[in-house]
Amino acid sequence: MKVMVLVKANDDSEAGRMPSEQLLTEMGNFNQALAEAGVMRSGEGLHPTSKAKRVACDGHQRVVTDGPFAETKELIAGFWIWEVASMDEAVDWVKKSPFQAGEIEIRPVFEAEDFGEEFTPELRQQEARVFAHAMLNGSTTQPYLFFAGRCEEALEFYKQALGANVQMMMRFSDSPDPLPEGMLQNGFENKVMHATFTIGSMTLMGSDGCNDATRFSGFRLALTVPDENAAHHALDALAAGGTIDMPLQKTFWSPCYGQVTDKFGLGWMVMVAGPTA
């Protein structure tokens, strides 16, 4: 079952007084124990109500009230969301918390089955979509490039051409788990299984892949640089052994824009940011 654990406010929390170093250390250790036990899903402390607002609803009317609010014992200073087997387990965890004063409230969170038949399959699907979208708001997207056996060569090329920084590189032979039989093309045993590298502020990932059949198509990497000199340098460096598909020129979206395919078959768009002059 899922529960919300509410930490009630006190005079110190409402005054904005920060916890002592000792309490912060003990709370960090407690949270670590919760996480290692698979109990903790989330948890946050809250600013005092002097920074809060309340919105009262009366039909279509909305009345906003600025904090601070009275009745400290009814206010909340922080919360956790826990996944536990029972309320008894939640109580046991609260008893282990480092708090020396105040009150903690434990409230079960509604589950889908609590709503009965009124919570129709359509409503369940809608809720699932909403939560999936909410979770994806914190996701990241990064290009993952397969170099068909030339990854190490490519990394060295991007170091020289664009100042790339290789953060890590692992070969298939370094894998802690055995690879499925027949997965790799012969001769790929010492090829790059995974690499992470940065070009400017962008993080990319790369690999040799499992054979030499992979090819880049249907996309280009957009490289934005601060000025025209940097654009010419980047385009010329990337074009070594490759092809300039569109020389640098002025466009309606950039004062300097061009396209190049490097010697590994990877397409690039090189541009200077900002409107045309």
Image: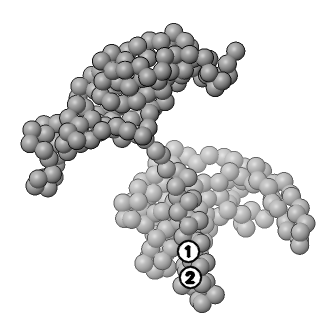
Is 37 left, or right, of 106 in this rendering? left
Q: Is residue 95 visible?
A: no
> What's the residue type where badge 2 is placed?
Pro
| Residue positioned 59% across, 79% down in the render | 122
Horizontal side, residue 273 vs residue 47: left or right: left
Residue 86 screen position, x and y as percent: 46, 80
Instruction: State the image coordinates of residue 261 (x, y, percent, origin top left).
Output: 38, 25
Task: Find residue 125 and name its label.
Answer: 1
Give the residue at x 56% y 77%.
124
Query: Which residue reaches farthest bottom?
Result: 117
User: Dividing the image into 4 quarters, which one contains the C terminus?
Assistant: top right
Camera-side residue: 114 or 47? 114
Task: Give the number of callouts.
Answer: 2
Q: Which mark is residue 68?
A: none
* Amino acid type of the residue tagged 1 in the rendering: Gln
Residue 127 in view in this figure: yes
Q: Which corner quadrant of the image does residue 34 belong to?
A: bottom left
**CB contact under 8 Å: marks 2 and 1:** yes
In the depicted structure, whether residue 128 falls above or below residue 237: below
Residue found at the very far top of the displayed protein: 229
The answer to whether residue 58 is above or below residue 185 is below
Q: Dot 1, how many residues are within 10 Å of its Cα: few (below 14), some (14-19), or many (20+)?
A: few
The x, y position of residue 55, in whole percent, is 82, 62
Of 225 and 10, nearer the camera is 225
Write down the residue under mark 2. 121
Vertical order, 75 against 160 (above or below)? below
Q: The residue tagged with tag 1: helix, strand or loop?
A: helix
- Please name the residue shown 37% across and 18% down the image: 239
Local secondary structure at mark 2: helix
